[in-house]
Image (tube, coloured by chain):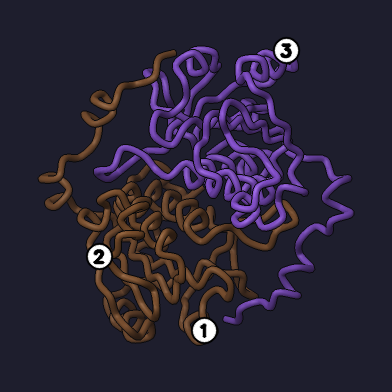
Chain colours: A purple, B brown
Amino acid sequence: MRKLTHEEIAKKRLSAAEIVSIERFPVTVLLDNIRSLYNVGSIFRSADGARVGELILTGYTPAPPRREIEKTALGATSTVPWRYCTDPMEAVAGLKKSGVRICAVEHTDRSRPFHTLEARDLPVCLVIGNEITGIRPGLVAAADVAVEIPMYGMKQSLNAAVAFGIVAFHCAAIAAGARPRGQ
Amino acid sequence: MRKLTHEEIAKKRLSAAEIVSIERFPVTVLLDNIRSLYNVGSIFRSADGARVGELILTGYTPAPPRREIEKTALGATSTVPWRYCTDPMEAVAGLKKSGVRICAVEHTDRSRPFHTLEARDLPVCLVIGNEITGIRPGLVAAADVAVEIPMYGMKQSLNAAVAFGIVAFHCAAIAAGARPRGQ
Protein backbone atom coordinates (compact mmCIF):
# COMPACT_ATOMS: atom_id res chain seq x y z
CA MET A 1 0.00 0.00 0.00
CA ARG A 2 1.33 3.42 -0.94
CA LYS A 3 0.58 6.84 0.52
CA LEU A 4 -0.74 9.35 -2.02
CA THR A 5 1.34 12.46 -2.68
CA HIS A 6 -0.01 15.93 -1.93
CA GLU A 7 -0.46 16.41 -5.68
CA GLU A 8 -2.47 13.21 -6.04
CA ILE A 9 -4.73 14.18 -3.13
CA ALA A 10 -5.11 17.74 -4.44
CA LYS A 11 -6.42 16.39 -7.75
CA LYS A 12 -9.28 14.73 -5.89
CA ARG A 13 -10.29 18.00 -4.19
CA LEU A 14 -12.29 20.96 -5.45
CA SER A 15 -10.40 24.00 -6.71
CA ALA A 16 -10.94 27.51 -5.32
CA ALA A 17 -13.01 28.33 -8.44
CA GLU A 18 -15.17 25.22 -8.06
CA ILE A 19 -15.74 25.70 -4.34
CA VAL A 20 -17.54 29.04 -4.81
CA SER A 21 -19.91 27.70 -7.49
CA ILE A 22 -20.75 24.24 -6.13
CA GLU A 23 -24.04 23.59 -4.38
CA ARG A 24 -23.30 23.18 -0.70
CA PHE A 25 -24.90 20.63 1.62
CA PRO A 26 -28.11 21.64 3.47
CA VAL A 27 -26.27 21.73 6.78
CA THR A 28 -25.94 25.01 8.68
CA VAL A 29 -23.87 25.39 11.84
CA LEU A 30 -24.52 27.81 14.67
CA LEU A 31 -21.69 28.38 17.16
CA ASP A 32 -22.91 30.04 20.33
CA ASN A 33 -20.51 31.48 22.88
CA ILE A 34 -17.55 29.39 21.79
CA ARG A 35 -14.60 30.68 23.76
CA SER A 36 -11.56 29.21 22.05
CA LEU A 37 -10.20 30.84 18.91
CA TYR A 38 -8.50 27.54 18.04
CA ASN A 39 -11.79 25.66 18.29
CA VAL A 40 -13.44 28.20 15.98
CA GLY A 41 -10.62 27.78 13.45
CA SER A 42 -10.72 24.01 13.67
CA ILE A 43 -14.51 24.07 13.15
CA PHE A 44 -14.01 26.23 10.02
CA ARG A 45 -11.53 23.64 8.70
CA SER A 46 -13.92 20.74 9.36
CA ALA A 47 -16.87 22.76 7.95
CA ASP A 48 -14.95 23.11 4.68
CA GLY A 49 -14.37 19.36 4.55
CA ALA A 50 -18.03 18.63 5.34
CA ARG A 51 -19.16 21.23 2.78
CA VAL A 52 -21.32 23.02 5.37
CA GLY A 53 -23.76 25.52 3.84
CA GLU A 54 -23.23 28.32 6.32
CA LEU A 55 -21.45 28.88 9.60
CA ILE A 56 -23.20 31.35 11.90
CA LEU A 57 -21.17 32.80 14.77
CA THR A 58 -23.24 34.18 17.67
CA GLY A 59 -22.80 35.59 21.16
CA TYR A 60 -19.17 36.07 22.14
CA THR A 61 -17.86 33.52 19.62
CA PRO A 62 -14.82 35.21 18.03
CA ALA A 63 -15.04 35.92 14.28
CA PRO A 64 -12.41 36.20 11.53
CA PRO A 65 -10.07 37.82 10.85
CA ARG A 66 -8.05 36.67 13.85
CA ARG A 67 -4.55 35.25 13.67
CA GLU A 68 -5.36 32.40 16.09
CA ILE A 69 -8.46 31.38 14.10
CA GLU A 70 -6.40 31.26 10.89
CA LYS A 71 -3.78 29.11 12.62
CA THR A 72 -6.23 26.19 12.83
CA ALA A 73 -8.60 27.14 9.97
CA LEU A 74 -5.74 26.98 7.45
CA GLY A 75 -7.60 29.11 4.89
CA ALA A 76 -11.08 27.66 5.41
CA THR A 77 -12.46 31.03 6.54
CA SER A 78 -12.45 32.00 2.87
CA THR A 79 -14.10 28.81 1.56
CA VAL A 80 -16.93 28.42 4.09
CA PRO A 81 -19.78 30.99 3.89
CA TRP A 82 -20.16 32.58 7.32
CA ARG A 83 -21.74 35.51 9.14
CA TYR A 84 -21.79 36.93 12.62
CA CYS A 85 -25.09 37.52 14.39
CA THR A 86 -25.15 38.78 17.99
CA ASP A 87 -28.34 37.05 19.02
CA PRO A 88 -28.61 33.28 18.35
CA MET A 89 -32.40 33.41 18.81
CA GLU A 90 -32.69 35.84 15.92
CA ALA A 91 -30.63 33.52 13.70
CA VAL A 92 -32.71 30.52 14.79
CA ALA A 93 -35.98 32.33 14.03
CA GLY A 94 -34.77 33.08 10.50
CA LEU A 95 -33.65 29.51 9.91
CA LYS A 96 -36.94 28.08 11.20
CA LYS A 97 -38.84 30.37 8.83
CA SER A 98 -36.81 28.82 5.99
CA GLY A 99 -37.78 25.31 7.06
CA VAL A 100 -34.46 24.42 8.67
CA ARG A 101 -34.63 21.97 11.57
CA ILE A 102 -32.69 23.20 14.62
CA CYS A 103 -30.58 20.41 16.10
CA ALA A 104 -28.85 20.94 19.44
CA VAL A 105 -25.66 18.90 19.84
CA GLU A 106 -26.26 18.56 23.56
CA HIS A 107 -27.19 16.19 26.35
CA THR A 108 -30.91 16.82 26.87
CA ASP A 109 -33.87 14.86 28.18
CA ARG A 110 -34.74 14.05 24.57
CA SER A 111 -31.31 13.54 22.90
CA ARG A 112 -30.93 10.69 20.45
CA PRO A 113 -27.68 9.21 19.10
CA PHE A 114 -26.26 11.41 16.34
CA HIS A 115 -26.07 8.52 13.88
CA THR A 116 -29.86 8.28 13.83
CA LEU A 117 -29.98 11.59 11.92
CA GLU A 118 -31.07 10.76 8.40
CA ALA A 119 -31.84 12.39 5.06
CA ARG A 120 -35.35 13.39 6.08
CA ASP A 121 -33.87 15.44 8.94
CA LEU A 122 -32.27 17.80 6.40
CA PRO A 123 -32.02 20.76 6.04
CA VAL A 124 -30.58 20.97 9.52
CA CYS A 125 -28.74 23.51 11.67
CA LEU A 126 -26.30 21.97 14.14
CA VAL A 127 -25.99 24.09 17.28
CA ILE A 128 -22.70 23.89 19.20
CA GLY A 129 -22.46 25.62 22.57
CA ASN A 130 -19.82 26.81 24.98
CA GLU A 131 -16.92 24.46 25.82
CA ILE A 132 -17.77 24.36 29.53
CA THR A 133 -21.44 25.25 29.92
CA GLY A 134 -22.84 23.90 26.64
CA ILE A 135 -25.77 25.48 24.81
CA ARG A 136 -27.79 28.14 26.68
CA PRO A 137 -31.08 26.72 28.07
CA GLY A 138 -33.23 29.11 25.99
CA LEU A 139 -31.51 27.96 22.82
CA VAL A 140 -31.91 24.29 23.80
CA ALA A 141 -35.62 24.94 24.38
CA ALA A 142 -35.89 26.43 20.87
CA ALA A 143 -34.35 23.35 19.21
CA ASP A 144 -36.52 20.91 17.26
CA VAL A 145 -34.29 17.96 18.01
CA ALA A 146 -31.16 17.13 20.00
CA VAL A 147 -28.42 14.62 19.31
CA GLU A 148 -25.57 13.35 21.41
CA ILE A 149 -22.46 11.29 20.80
CA PRO A 150 -22.70 8.10 22.87
CA MET A 151 -19.92 8.26 25.46
CA TYR A 152 -18.43 4.92 26.48
CA GLY A 153 -15.87 6.16 29.00
CA MET A 154 -15.70 8.19 32.17
CA LYS A 155 -15.57 11.71 30.74
CA GLN A 156 -18.88 13.49 30.19
CA SER A 157 -18.08 15.09 26.88
CA LEU A 158 -15.67 15.67 24.01
CA ASN A 159 -13.77 18.71 22.86
CA ALA A 160 -16.25 20.99 21.03
CA ALA A 161 -14.35 20.88 17.72
CA VAL A 162 -14.06 17.07 17.84
CA ALA A 163 -17.76 16.68 18.67
CA PHE A 164 -18.63 19.01 15.80
CA GLY A 165 -16.46 17.02 13.39
CA ILE A 166 -18.12 13.73 14.31
CA VAL A 167 -21.68 15.03 13.80
CA ALA A 168 -20.84 17.21 10.78
CA PHE A 169 -19.23 14.38 8.81
CA HIS A 170 -22.20 12.15 9.55
CA CYS A 171 -24.48 14.87 8.14
CA ALA A 172 -22.20 15.32 5.10
CA ALA A 173 -22.37 11.57 4.43
CA ILE A 174 -26.18 11.70 4.59
CA ALA A 175 -26.29 14.73 2.30
CA ALA A 176 -23.90 13.10 -0.16
CA GLY A 177 -26.12 10.03 -0.22
CA ALA A 178 -23.41 7.81 1.22
CA ARG A 179 -25.68 6.76 4.08
CA PRO A 180 -29.15 7.14 2.56
CA ARG A 181 -30.83 5.51 5.53
CA GLY A 182 -28.95 7.62 8.03
CA GLN A 183 -27.15 4.67 9.53
CA MET B 1 -36.59 20.24 25.65
CA ARG B 2 -34.34 20.58 28.69
CA LYS B 3 -30.58 20.36 29.04
CA LEU B 4 -29.39 17.70 31.49
CA THR B 5 -27.44 18.85 34.53
CA HIS B 6 -23.85 17.73 35.12
CA GLU B 7 -25.16 15.43 37.84
CA GLU B 8 -27.70 13.82 35.51
CA ILE B 9 -25.03 13.25 32.84
CA ALA B 10 -22.54 11.92 35.40
CA LYS B 11 -25.05 9.27 36.47
CA LYS B 12 -25.02 7.90 32.93
CA ARG B 13 -21.21 7.58 32.88
CA LEU B 14 -18.88 4.98 34.30
CA SER B 15 -17.24 5.65 37.65
CA ALA B 16 -13.47 5.57 38.18
CA ALA B 17 -13.87 2.14 39.83
CA GLU B 18 -15.95 0.77 36.95
CA ILE B 19 -13.63 2.12 34.26
CA VAL B 20 -10.67 0.03 35.43
CA SER B 21 -12.65 -3.21 35.52
CA ILE B 22 -14.79 -2.93 32.39
CA GLU B 23 -13.87 -4.81 29.22
CA ARG B 24 -12.60 -2.26 26.75
CA PHE B 25 -13.36 -2.21 23.02
CA PRO B 26 -11.00 -4.13 20.67
CA VAL B 27 -9.70 -0.88 19.23
CA THR B 28 -6.04 0.06 19.69
CA VAL B 29 -4.60 3.39 18.59
CA LEU B 30 -1.04 4.05 17.50
CA LEU B 31 0.09 7.68 17.36
CA ASP B 32 3.27 8.09 15.34
CA ASN B 33 5.27 11.31 15.39
CA ILE B 34 2.38 13.49 16.52
CA ARG B 35 3.88 16.89 17.18
CA SER B 36 1.23 18.77 19.12
CA LEU B 37 0.86 18.19 22.85
CA TYR B 38 -2.70 19.51 22.62
CA ASN B 39 -3.57 16.99 19.92
CA VAL B 40 -2.19 14.17 22.06
CA GLY B 41 -4.29 15.36 25.01
CA SER B 42 -7.41 15.72 22.89
CA ILE B 43 -6.88 12.21 21.49
CA PHE B 44 -6.62 10.85 25.05
CA ARG B 45 -9.94 12.54 25.88
CA SER B 46 -11.66 11.09 22.80
CA ALA B 47 -10.04 7.68 23.41
CA ASP B 48 -11.66 7.62 26.85
CA GLY B 49 -15.06 8.42 25.32
CA ALA B 50 -14.62 5.75 22.63
CA ARG B 51 -13.38 3.22 25.24
CA VAL B 52 -10.20 2.52 23.28
CA GLY B 53 -8.34 -0.58 24.45
CA GLU B 54 -4.85 0.87 24.35
CA LEU B 55 -3.14 4.01 23.12
CA ILE B 56 0.43 3.45 21.90
CA LEU B 57 2.66 6.50 21.55
CA THR B 58 5.60 6.08 19.18
CA GLY B 59 8.38 8.09 17.59
CA TYR B 60 8.60 11.66 18.89
CA THR B 61 4.95 11.73 20.01
CA PRO B 62 5.06 13.37 23.47
CA ALA B 63 3.93 11.22 26.39
CA PRO B 64 2.35 12.05 29.78
CA PRO B 65 2.97 13.56 32.21
CA ARG B 66 3.03 16.95 30.46
CA ARG B 67 1.05 19.96 31.54
CA GLU B 68 -0.07 20.75 27.97
CA ILE B 69 -1.31 17.19 27.40
CA GLU B 70 -3.33 17.33 30.62
CA LYS B 71 -4.86 20.65 29.57
CA THR B 72 -6.80 18.93 26.77
CA ALA B 73 -6.89 15.36 28.14
CA LEU B 74 -8.77 16.55 31.24
CA GLY B 75 -7.82 13.47 33.25
CA ALA B 76 -8.17 10.87 30.48
CA THR B 77 -4.47 9.97 30.72
CA SER B 78 -5.40 8.01 33.85
CA THR B 79 -8.45 6.23 32.37
CA VAL B 80 -7.02 5.12 29.01
CA PRO B 81 -4.38 2.34 29.10
CA TRP B 82 -1.28 3.62 27.26
CA ARG B 83 2.40 2.92 26.69
CA TYR B 84 5.29 4.50 24.88
CA CYS B 85 7.27 2.52 22.31
CA THR B 86 10.08 4.18 20.35
CA ASP B 87 9.67 2.13 17.18
CA PRO B 88 6.18 1.91 15.65
CA MET B 89 7.23 -1.11 13.55
CA GLU B 90 7.99 -3.05 16.72
CA ALA B 91 4.55 -2.20 18.13
CA VAL B 92 2.89 -3.15 14.83
CA ALA B 93 4.70 -6.51 14.72
CA GLY B 94 3.44 -7.34 18.22
CA LEU B 95 -0.12 -6.34 17.37
CA LYS B 96 -0.12 -8.38 14.17
CA LYS B 97 1.07 -11.40 16.09
CA SER B 98 -1.99 -10.97 18.33
CA GLY B 99 -4.31 -10.94 15.31
CA VAL B 100 -4.93 -7.20 15.31
CA ARG B 101 -5.61 -5.63 11.90
CA ILE B 102 -3.47 -2.55 11.27
CA CYS B 103 -5.56 0.27 9.80
CA ALA B 104 -3.84 3.41 8.52
CA VAL B 105 -5.99 6.54 8.72
CA GLU B 106 -4.39 7.95 5.61
CA HIS B 107 -4.90 8.78 1.95
CA THR B 108 -3.42 5.80 0.13
CA ASP B 109 -3.92 4.12 -3.22
CA ARG B 110 -6.17 1.61 -1.44
CA SER B 111 -8.05 3.73 1.11
CA ARG B 112 -11.74 3.09 1.61
CA PRO B 113 -14.28 5.34 3.40
CA PHE B 114 -13.98 4.95 7.16
CA HIS B 115 -17.67 4.15 7.56
CA THR B 116 -17.19 0.88 5.66
CA LEU B 117 -15.24 -0.50 8.65
CA GLU B 118 -17.43 -3.14 10.23
CA ALA B 119 -17.50 -5.64 13.07
CA ARG B 120 -15.50 -8.24 11.16
CA ASP B 121 -12.62 -5.70 10.87
CA LEU B 122 -12.13 -5.86 14.64
CA PRO B 123 -9.79 -6.09 16.51
CA VAL B 124 -8.22 -3.11 14.81
CA CYS B 125 -5.35 -0.70 15.43
CA LEU B 126 -5.97 2.80 14.06
CA VAL B 127 -2.70 4.46 13.04
CA ILE B 128 -2.57 8.26 13.12
CA GLY B 129 0.46 10.04 11.69
CA ASN B 130 2.13 13.42 11.84
CA GLU B 131 -0.04 16.53 11.44
CA ILE B 132 1.82 17.69 8.32
CA THR B 133 3.45 14.68 6.72
CA GLY B 134 0.99 11.95 7.73
CA ILE B 135 2.04 8.37 8.43
CA ARG B 136 5.60 7.32 7.47
CA PRO B 137 5.67 5.34 4.19
CA GLY B 138 7.14 2.23 5.84
CA LEU B 139 4.32 2.19 8.36
CA VAL B 140 1.71 2.68 5.61
CA ALA B 141 3.24 -0.26 3.75
CA ALA B 142 2.91 -2.41 6.88
CA ALA B 143 -0.82 -1.65 7.25
CA ASP B 144 -3.43 -4.27 6.37
CA VAL B 145 -6.04 -1.70 5.42
CA ALA B 146 -6.39 2.07 5.09
CA VAL B 147 -9.39 4.30 5.63
CA GLU B 148 -10.01 7.93 4.84
CA ILE B 149 -12.66 10.46 5.73
CA PRO B 150 -14.38 11.61 2.51
CA MET B 151 -13.51 15.29 2.06
CA TYR B 152 -16.18 17.39 0.34
CA GLY B 153 -14.37 20.74 0.38
CA MET B 154 -11.14 22.30 -0.78
CA LYS B 155 -8.85 21.37 2.09
CA GLN B 156 -6.95 18.10 1.84
CA SER B 157 -7.32 16.94 5.40
CA LEU B 158 -8.67 17.50 8.89
CA ASN B 159 -6.98 18.27 12.17
CA ALA B 160 -5.43 15.00 13.44
CA ALA B 161 -7.46 14.96 16.68
CA VAL B 162 -10.72 15.63 14.80
CA ALA B 163 -9.96 12.91 12.23
CA PHE B 164 -9.17 10.49 15.04
CA GLY B 165 -12.45 11.32 16.81
CA ILE B 166 -14.51 10.65 13.69
CA VAL B 167 -12.96 7.24 13.01
CA ALA B 168 -12.69 6.22 16.68
CA PHE B 169 -16.37 6.87 17.43
CA HIS B 170 -17.35 4.91 14.35
CA CYS B 171 -15.27 1.98 15.65
CA ALA B 172 -16.77 2.36 19.13
CA ALA B 173 -20.27 2.21 17.65
CA ILE B 174 -19.38 -0.98 15.77
CA ALA B 175 -17.83 -2.49 18.89
CA ALA B 176 -20.87 -1.55 20.99
CA GLY B 177 -23.11 -3.19 18.42
CA ALA B 178 -24.88 0.04 17.59
CA ARG B 179 -23.98 -0.34 13.94
CA PRO B 180 -23.70 -4.09 13.55
CA ARG B 181 -23.40 -3.90 9.81
CA GLY B 182 -20.74 -1.19 9.97
CA GLN B 183 -22.91 1.38 8.23
Q: From what the image shows, is residue A42 above or below residue A61?
A: below
Q: Which mark is residue A97?
A: 3
CA–CA distance in space, label 1 to label 2: 32 Å
Residue tagged 2: B65
Foreground label between 3 and 1: 3
- Please, is residue A39 above or below residue A114 in the view? below
Whole-percent x, y for residue B98 in the image: 27, 76
Q: Amino acid at mark 1?
A: Ala
Marks 3 and 1 sit apart, C-alpha to C-alpha, by: 52 Å
Q: Is residue A126 above or below residue A153?
A: above
Query: Residue A110, percent across and down?
Result: 41, 19
Q: Which residue is mark 1?
A: B141
- Residue B159, compared with residue B14, is above or below; it is below
The chain ID associated with circle 3 is A
Q: Secondary structure at mark 2?
A: loop
Secondary structure under tag 3 reads helix
Residues at discs 3 and 1 in contact (Cβ within 8 Å): no
Chain to which mark 2 belongs: B
Is A16 displayed left or right of A113 in the figure?
A: right
Secondary structure at numbered mark 1: helix
